[in-house]
């Protein structure tokens, strides 16, 4: 069976859906298909994240992450208000627990100022206690514009609106893109069920984006190296020790934010995620293993350079992943009163982190254009927060380059 659409989007995570939604708003007559290999939307990174609406203070001023996170958060909040999706702009604290972290804390604050993050404030130990009574630190930053949400709710709403915008639009669930080809300016996307014709293809395949790029004969110049993040959940007693969001000062060598406390929109409180090299791209347990994923990661030069440089931290993360005691110790830096009984193992997520062949983790969002094909090659955190802006950015580039003509 063959079908024709103006645009085919590969991947029904929040980035693919937000892009389809922005396209459907901009070009009302366009026919759009979203192809998702799972039976539900937002199954992978989108459905396994911390659910934080990031404020944009960590990212290098002028970077895509900084610009699209700030714009995207505003647009996301307006969107969820319009569609009555539960969320809470509860604010967060970033807490330095030792004097030696103060330099990095100051850097983050200055970044926030440069990025014009609204309302950020330097706070002292007393103010930290007023905001989070169980948290102990020497100094911190109060970030009033950060919030919480469930990105699966957002994804489902986007899916509904995409199909509503035009009766020709379709979301195909349980269809895996297996091949992409081009002939006479027409693209052919072959799935496990059919071949679809399109003028423009947008690949937002998250943990598989490098593989999809290769199927499209694009050398992505990077590889996805999966980093699992395990969470613990606070017990009823433990929950009383956290009001909203408490973050440590992150290690500037890594693109991850460090284990933190997050009140979820359903009322639970989670702590995590750690960042462990994963032997499976979509592996959500501590022992998950996939031979192809492992071989691909371990035959990539960049992985070895990264591991050589950071072997101590990698080993430490691996040990902590199997030791509740070590995990608790990290958390106790922020909340000294936390006990073993306060935390219980919970779910995990896997981050799609793009790594270049020199072992550098690509910090910024990476979106490549090849003729009439667009590939989102690095969309880690805060891409859920920024998704509507990422979508808007892709639509603007499609317009600027006349790809739909
Ligand atoms: C542990 C963790 C915590 C995070 N916390 C936050 C946070 O608090 N706030 C925030 O803003 N961001 C956070 N992020 C980042 C955020 O979740 C991601 O940036 C975002 O979800 C990326 O969306 P995506 O659509 O690119 O990827 P995904 O959600 O992974 O979607 C990609 C989709 O493509 C599909 N796909 C792949 N290959 C194919 C194929 N061949 N054919 C068809 N479909 C295919 C997959 O099944 C998947 O559904 C976190 C991420 C993780 C892992």
Image (cartoon, helix red, strand yellow):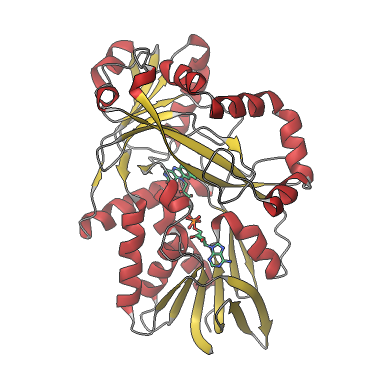
Residue 27: where, in percent of width, then height?
39, 78
Q: Evaluate whether residue 58 shows in this view.
A: no
Q: Quadrant of the N terminus?
A: bottom right
Q: Is residue 257 above or below residue 402?
A: above
Q: Evaluate whether residue 316 shows in this view.
A: yes
Q: Quadrant of residue 332?
A: top left
Which residue does the image show at 40% across and 41% down from the upper left? Answer: 50
Which residue does the image show at 46% across and 48% down from the upper left? Answer: 67
Pick the front one: 358 or 286: 286
Pick the front one: 154 or 38: 38
**Number of numbered discs overlaid on the protein picture:** 0
Q: Is residue 328 above or below residue 38?
A: above
Residue 360: where, in percent of width, then height?
69, 40
Which residue does the image show at 53% across and 23% down from the upper left? Answer: 323
Please indicate whether residue 398 sits to the left or right of residue 165 in the image: right
Q: Quadrant of residue 173?
A: bottom left
Pick the front one: 94 or 389: 94
Residue 339: where, in percent of width, then height?
36, 16
Residue 71: where, in percent of width, then height?
39, 51
């Amino acid at each position: 069976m063959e079908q024709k659409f103006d645009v085919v989007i590969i991947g029904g995570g929040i980035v693919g859906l937000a892009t389809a939604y922005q396209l459907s708003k901009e070009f009302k007559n366009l026919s759009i298909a979203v192809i998702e290999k799972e039976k539900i939307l937002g199954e992978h990174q989108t459905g396994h994240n911390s659910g934080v609406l990031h404020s944009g203070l960590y990212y290098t001023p002028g970077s895509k992450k900084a610009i699209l996170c700030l714009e995207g958060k505003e647009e996301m909040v307006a969107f969820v208000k319009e569609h009555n999706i539960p969320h809470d702009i509860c604010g967060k604290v970033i807490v330095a627990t030792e004097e030696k972290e103060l330099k990095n804390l100051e850097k983050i604050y200055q970044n926030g100022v440069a990025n014009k993050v609204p309302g950020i404030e330097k706070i002292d130990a007393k103010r930290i206690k007023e905001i989070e009574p169980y948290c102990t630190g020497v100094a911190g930053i109060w970030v009033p514009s950060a919030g919480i949400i469930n990105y699966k709710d957002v994804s489902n709403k986007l899916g509904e609106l995409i199909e509503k915008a035009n009766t020709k639009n379709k979301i195909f669930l349980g269809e895996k893109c297996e091949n992409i080809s081009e002939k006479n300016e027409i693209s052919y996307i072959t799935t496990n069920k059919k071949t679809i014709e399109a003028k423009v293809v947008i690949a937002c395949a998250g943990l598989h984006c490098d593989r999809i790029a290769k199927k499209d004969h694009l050398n992505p110049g990077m590889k996805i190296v999966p980093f699992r993040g395990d969470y613990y959940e606070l017990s009823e007693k433990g929950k009383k020790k956290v009001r909203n969001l408490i973050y440590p000062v992150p290690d500037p060598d890594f693109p991850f934010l460090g284990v933190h406390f997050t009140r979820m929109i359903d009322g639970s409180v989670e702590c995590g995620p750690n960042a462990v090299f994963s032997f499976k791209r979509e592996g959500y347990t501590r022992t998950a293993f996939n031979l192809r994923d492992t071989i691909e990661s371990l035959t990539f030069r960049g992985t070895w350079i990264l591991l050589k440089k950071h072997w101590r931290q990698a080993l430490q993360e691996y040990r902590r992943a199997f030791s509740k005691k070590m995990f608790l110790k990290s958390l106790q830096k922020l909340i000294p009163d936390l006990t073993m009984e306060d935390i219980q193992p919970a779910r995990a997520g896997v981050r799609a982190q793009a790594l270049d062949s020199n072992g550098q983790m690509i910090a910024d969002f990476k979106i490549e254009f090849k003729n009439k094909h667009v590939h989102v090659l690095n969309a880690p955190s805060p891409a859920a927060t920024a998704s509507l802006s990422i979508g808007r950015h892709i639509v603007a580039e499609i317009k600027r380059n006349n790809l739909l003509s």
